[in-house]
Image (cartoon, coloured by chain):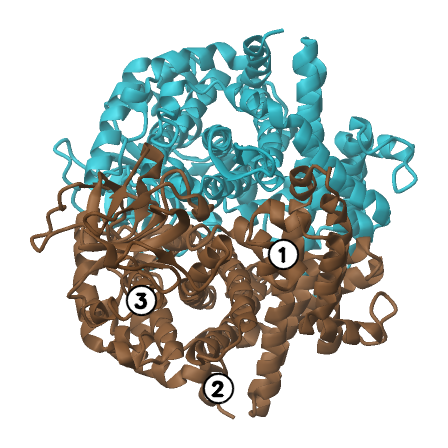
Chain colours: A brown, B cyan
């Protein structure tokens, strides 16, 4: 088989279920129109460029894909996030700005609003109504349930009064707010005559048709950031701003014309997290954007390592290609293998999300599982992006530091991905907690108290009830540990080692948190002391789920050569992950010292074996050449 | 003792031998004049600002400290690099631009030139003669011995003809070249009628008094970079540019008026590395700048973690300070402890350099050791800076991403430190090789051939001859491994564990490279396959030397409270380093699984114990409050 055919076969696997959309995006999203600026622009020029690109993007029809047909969209969720993801090969400012307009703002109106709000959706799709998503406040970012902005019903005038009571209740870091948005989806504590009902979302006009702030709304600019300077992040303060009562996005909690509040979900915390859950697409999209940026960076660094030479080999007149050095292979190839894993796991996540969100009858548990999976993969994809793009920069030396070679912007733009749409540290705790219970609502929300007061017996039961855990246990029963008879190179052995780590960490966590359930226990101290254990458990879980996606993609590949190649890449991913955690396997008697050293040898061996295919593996990302234009790869 | 007194005592230890200079810099280098811009400037405005700051800096008298009295300086090398290091709390563009002018360009003229060039030094100090250091070429950065620019003697006219023979021989990434330099210290292959003599340095005017490029010199701009945009990096191409023969900086190889070349060092490679060795100050200064930037970032992040609250603790109305979370302590406190280690090891390095370079009778071996130590610490300090400033950014969440909070610039500016003044990957190989032989010249330079052909027997002998190694062996003889009777908390035990790792890796390396000495061996393949082993050995060596510096600073501290506190910080540094390498200790039977887990427990315990002192520990960096002004710490 020719190299081009092999590349095509591998690309087919990576492109996945929405390959047609990817192919369409490859031709439609030309670098000239949607690509990153060739050189850094000042902030204002960059914002203006991205705004113009937003209009071009609106004209392509892609933004409508994510909205239901009855609201004027085309109702293909998977296609929507896949097209969005492809923007991640270009200017990430455009990706984020598009995510704010169509994902967060549009998503809030579509998913939290009712039929009285849905007529706005076509105007949001067409960009006739630019908006923003005003959730984060200066004082509360991760703990959004404690937001302080207030929306008080004035029953006499049938209005909601939006107010910023303290400086730290100011809406902060709001994308699209500093320059373009005319309306904000404002999250605020809803108060009626009957009392407070927790955080809800209200549509508040913030600028008039001429782009001037409306009375009572103070808009300031967050100014320059480390990256993403094409996005106009701003701050919003409200001084008793009045909007019609009906501006409340009332799907999960509404106020009728008599001023009476009602909700289909009684528990306030559960209601809030149900609302948040509908916005899972944002988190999935961040993971997708991070993945695309990582693939771009690797395509640049591997191509550079394949043409840049330094130092002469003994007995040879030629200088050695960087990628022929083991140290260089070690930098790039395990990261490349894990990028394959993240890409394939992301494809599966998008597919699940599409199925769950396209099915009105999908059970709530499916939605909760989707949220856990999205949170976990968001952490993995964004942390991997930060680490890998950095390694790519370093692997390109000084060339990697020049703006003309793009790695600088990729690095700076993606840096905040580990923070926004859920801080990674907070998300890992959330994933671990959801693993502990299986059902988030069983302990009344995400707060630490509920979590640790939740009885240990219930924890253990919930654990056993989970289908995934049962499968694991069945698998594990037939042997793990150092005496495993399968070789380390066996995918089954690798998966068992991943599953075993997850299971053992999870069981240890249950035991460790049990004392917190005692009535006189210092629950915070116990939970806080276990934070690193929670993180390790969550990471082990995400690792296992990700490896399963990779293995299943390999198994499903019908082309022999592509399957063999992907199998090796999967082995490099699995073994380099085991190598990174080998201290754990040694400490828990899962690897002997000799086998642990063997893992490192196998990783080195796989690097050497895959080195000749490194270019094929980045070519199979299918990134159009014009999107990869850089000074360091031009000519030569 | 009051907290302020304790802070002062700890600061005294960190300030070290040149504390007076540090104190002077604290008052002289006011943030208003020398600090970073409050908001990002466009590239041209930033360059212009830094140029103006260079003039202000020249007026302070600091730049003269590093030059000998007989050349118009004040001849205090330690004071010079310490004052320079203090710039690392401000705008790193100024630090780098100053380093180019006075460290690299001035250093080349002073150290590679002869009395015919030294009259230029006062003009360099005063900035009357702005210059640049033109070593790196497009095609050769790490392998500078293979540079392709040519300096050919034209004996008829008594001139050297400087020429760029191919596009990749273009001088590239040259700081100060794009805008300000009027003269370049150009590294080129020197050719006379008698043949080639290897790389030498020649002074070449590149701009006239009006700042226009001189005929034959083409200057282009490298354009925007990820950071350091106040530094004007440029490219230089020479088209048969003629300069007087006497422009050759001839200390290590000169041409007389008859056109005859002579050198005090016969071996060409040794001569070149001797020249490079005189420039060690640049590498030391980069490590110092990285250290100062790291301390700045930690001072910001710890202060933020000490005032930012998120989520409510069960049973308490108050939200929890970020720094009270274990996950947050884990992010910042081990990094803080290692920052202490790096700072103290750097102080020792500066002190050694001062002593060696101030002593005309210092033996060559002392210079070689200094170079190895400088290379190793440059790697540790810059890699630690990249990782730690990133963690600080993440620990400050979205606030860390705003330009107004400085972490963005610190991160972007220091990113290239792992690459310039010696790529870290290349330097680690160099450190390992110098450990293998003790004497670099014994294998004729740094090339791979010489290195691996160098007989195994000689390697082993050289190893035993080294004083440091002998001390180690003596120490190690009385017990290491899992049966060590000292507790893990004992500094002696910790140091032995560091030394044992270094020693074992080094001995393994000798055995592993032995086959390469066989005449028919594929020396490149053997050395290449061992690159990760070389890196690990070098890291272990640097870790050990760094811990020794820390332990000796603790031992030398005369204040009880400060000594106790520093002892704990040192233990956290040592144990978190052991924790990071615990897989190695487990694989080599130096830790039982139970003890390995205990290491993690001890690290957690020390984090908790040091948490109340975290602010004291960053206050003791002695960074003036106005240098730490950021939006996120203002008010509140």
- Judge depth for marks 3 and 2 and give the one in front: 2
Disc number at residue A634? 3
Instruction: Kindly identify which chain the residue marked by label 2 belongs to.
Output: A
Please name the residue shown 63% across and 6% down the image. B1
* Helix, strand or loop status at disc 1: helix
Pick out the residue farthest to the left.
A210
- Up-down relation of residue A108 to residue B127 (above or below): below
Residue B153 can be seen in this image:
no
Residue B573 can be seen in this image:
yes
Instruction: Confirm whether circles 1 and 2 share one chain.
Output: yes
Q: CA distance from mark 3 to mark 2?
A: 23 Å
Q: CA distance from mark 1 to mark 2?
A: 43 Å
- Up-down relation of residue B409 to residue B16 (above or below): below
Instruction: Evaluate if marks 3 and 2 touch, with contact meaning CB atoms under 8 Å apart.
Output: no
Asked which quadrant contains residue B336, the reply is top right
Please name the residue shown 70% across and 10% down the image. B560
Nearest the camera: A193 or B104?
A193
Please name the residue shown 49% across and 87% down the image. A9
Nearest the camera: B491 or B159?
B491
Instruction: Kindly identify which chain the residue marked by label 3 belongs to.
Output: A
* Helix, strand or loop status at disc 3: loop
Nearest the camera: A528 or B102?
A528
Q: CA distance from mark 3 to mark 1?
A: 46 Å
Q: Residues within 10 Å of mark 2 (few under 14, many from 20)?
A: few
- Tell me the residue that label 2 is attached to: A3
* Helix, strand or loop status at disc 2: helix
Disc number at residue A432? 1
- On the picture, is B543 further left or further right than B470? left
Pick out the residue farthest to the front.
A258
Instruction: Confirm whether circles 3 and 1 share one chain.
Output: yes
Quarter of the image for the C terminus of chain A: give it.
bottom left
Instruction: Kindly identify which chain the residue marked by label 1 belongs to.
Output: A
């Amino acid at each position: 088989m020719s190299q081009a055919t092999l590349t095509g076969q591998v690309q087919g696997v990576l492109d996945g279920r929405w390959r047609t959309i990817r192919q369409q995006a490859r031709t439609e999203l030309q670098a000239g129109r949607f690509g990153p600026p060739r050189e850094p622009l000042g902030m204002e020029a960059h914002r203006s460029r991205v705004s113009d690109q937003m209009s071009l993007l609106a004209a392509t029809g892609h933004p409508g894909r994510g909205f239901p047909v009855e609201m004027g969209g085309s109702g293909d969720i998977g296609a929507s996030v896949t097209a969005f993801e492809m923007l991640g090969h270009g200017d990430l400012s455009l990706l984020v700005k598009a995510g704010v307009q169509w994902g967060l703002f549009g998503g809030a109106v579509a998913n939290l609003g009712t039929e009285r709000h849905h007529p706005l959706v076509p105007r949001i799709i067409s960009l006739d109504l630019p908006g923003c998503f005003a959730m984060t406040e200066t004082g509360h970012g991760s703990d959004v349930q404690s937001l302080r902005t207030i929306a008080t019903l004035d029953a006499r005038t049938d209005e909601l009064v939006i107010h910023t009571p303290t400086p730290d209740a100011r809406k902060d870091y709001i994308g699209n707010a500093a320059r373009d948005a005319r309306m904000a989806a404002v999250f605020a504590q809803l108060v009626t005559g009957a009392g407070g009902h927790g955080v809800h979302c209200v549509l508040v006009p913030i600028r008039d048709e001429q782009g001037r702030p409306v009375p009572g709304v103070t808009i300031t600019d967050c100014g320059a950031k480390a990256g993403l300077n094409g996005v106009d992040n701003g701050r919003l303060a409200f001084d008793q701003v009045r909007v019609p009562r009906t501006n409340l996005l009332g799907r999960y909690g509404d106020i009728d014309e008599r001023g009476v509040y009602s909700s289909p979900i009684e528990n306030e915390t559960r209601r809030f997290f149900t609302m948040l859950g509908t916005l899972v697409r944002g988190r999935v999209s961040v993971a997708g954007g991070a993945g695309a940026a990582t693939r771009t960076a690797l395509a640049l660094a591997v191509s550079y390592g394949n043409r840049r030479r330094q130092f002469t080999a003994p007995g040879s007149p030629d200088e050695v290609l960087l990628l022929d050095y083991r140290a260089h292979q070690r930098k790039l190839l395990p990261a490349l293998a894990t990028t394959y894993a993240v890409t394939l796991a992301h494809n599966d996540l998008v597919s699940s999300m599409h199925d769950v969100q396209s099915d009105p009858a999908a059970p709530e548990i499916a939605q909760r599982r989707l949220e856990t999976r999205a949170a976990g993969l968001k952490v993995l994809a964004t942390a991997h992006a930060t680490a890998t793009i950095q390694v790519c920069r370093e692997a390109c030396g000084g060339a990697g530091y020049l703006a003309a070679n793009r790695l600088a912007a990729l690095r700076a733009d993606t840096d905040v991905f580990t923070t926004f749409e859920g801080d990674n540290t907070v998300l890992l705790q959330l994933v671990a907690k959801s693993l502990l219970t299986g059902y988030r609502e069983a302990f009344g929300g995400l707060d630490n108290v509920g979590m640790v007061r939740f009885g240990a017996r219930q924890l253990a039961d919930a654990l056993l009830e989970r289908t995934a855990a049962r499968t694991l246990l069945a698998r594990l029963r037939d042997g793990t540990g150092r005496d495993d008879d399968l070789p380390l190179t066996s995918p089954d052995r690798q998966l068992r080692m991943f599953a075993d780590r997850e299971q053992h960490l999870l069981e240890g966590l249950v035991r460790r948190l049990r004392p917190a359930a005692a009535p006189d226990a210092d629950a915070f101290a116990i939970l806080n002391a276990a934070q690193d254990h929670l993180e390790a458990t969550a990471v082990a879980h995400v690792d296992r789920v990700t490896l399963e996606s990779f293995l299943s993609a390999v198994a499903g590949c019908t082309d022999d050569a592509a399957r063999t190649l992907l199998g090796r890449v999967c082995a490099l991913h699995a073994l380099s992950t085991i190598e990174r955690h080998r201290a754990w396997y040694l400490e828990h008697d899962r690897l002997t010292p000799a086998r642990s050293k063997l893992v490192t040898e196998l990783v080195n061996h796989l690097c050497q074996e895959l080195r000749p295919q490194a270019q094929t593996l980045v070519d199979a990302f299918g990134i159009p050449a014009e999107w990869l234009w850089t000074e360091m790869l031009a000519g030569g």
